[in-house]
Image (cartoon, rainbow, N blue to C red):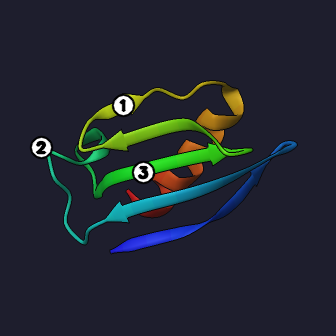
């Protein structure tokens, strides 16, 4: 299932896309969880990307916070 939305962290607004499943996956999920794909963008630039493996690590603390919030909700 795909989810899309925006999240505000400090003074940044992130747009996100997340593909998540009902069951976790040791092979493809983030930390063995339910999220197999997740992208965060701020001002049109990708600040985090995971597509069945890490592509772009969080670029700063605000991105790490946004990722933690989405992990809690979907993973």
As helix, strand or loop, the secondary structure at mark 3 comes to strand
Dividing the picture into quarters, in which one does residue 63 lie?
top right
Q: Which residue is mark 3?
A: 38
Front position in the image: 74 or 52:
52
Alpha-carbon distance for marks 3 and 2?
A: 15 Å
Instruction: Judge from the rendering whether residue 31 lies leftward or rightward of residue 26; answer left or right.
Output: right
**Image coords of residue 39 (percent x, y):** 48, 48
In the image, which disc is placed on residue 55?
1
Q: Residue at x 67, y 62 (%)?
A: 6
* Image x and y of residue 35, in percent: 33, 55
Of 11 and 73, which appears nearest the observer? 11
Query: Disc 1 vs disc 2: which is toward the camera?
Result: 1
Q: Quadrant of the C terminus?
A: bottom left
| Mark nearer the N terminus (3 vs 2) | 2
**Marks 3 and 2: which is nearer the front?**
3
The numbered mark, 1 or 2, whose residue comes first in the sequence reads: 2
State how far apart marks 1 and 3 are (Cα). Answer: 10 Å
Mark 1 is surrounded, within 10 Å at the Cα level, by few (under 14), some (14 to 19) or many (20 or more) other residues, namely: few
Q: Is residue 21 above or below residue 30?
A: below
Q: Give yes or no for contact between labels 3 and 2 (Cβ–Cβ under 8 Å).
A: no
SS class, disc 2: loop
Query: For the residue carrying disc 2, how many other residues have a C-alpha within 10 Å: few (<14), some (14-19), or many (20+)?
Result: few
Q: Which residue is mark 2?
A: 27
Q: Quadrant of the N terminus?
A: bottom left
Q: Looking at the image, is mark 1 or mark 3 earlier in the sequence?
A: 3
Disc 3 residue crowd, few under 14, some 14–19, many 20+, Cα 10 Å: many
Q: Quadrant of residue 5?
A: bottom right
**At numbered mark 1, what does the secondary structure look like: helix, strand or loop?**
strand
Question: What residue is rendered at 39% in x and 71% in y?
Answer: 2
Distance between the alpha carbons at the discs numbered 1 and 2 = 15 Å
As drawn, is 28 to the left or to the right of 72?
left
């Amino acid at each position: 299932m795909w989810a899309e939305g925006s999240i505000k962290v400090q003074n940044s607004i992130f747009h996100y896309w997340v593909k998540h499943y009902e069951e976790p996956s040791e092979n493809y999920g983030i930390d063995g969880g339910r999220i197999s794909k997740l992208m965060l963008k701020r001002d049109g630039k990708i600040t985090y990307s995971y597509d069945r493996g890490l592509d772009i690590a969080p670029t700063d603390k605000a991105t790490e916070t946004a990722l933690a919030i989405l992990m809690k909700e979907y993973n």
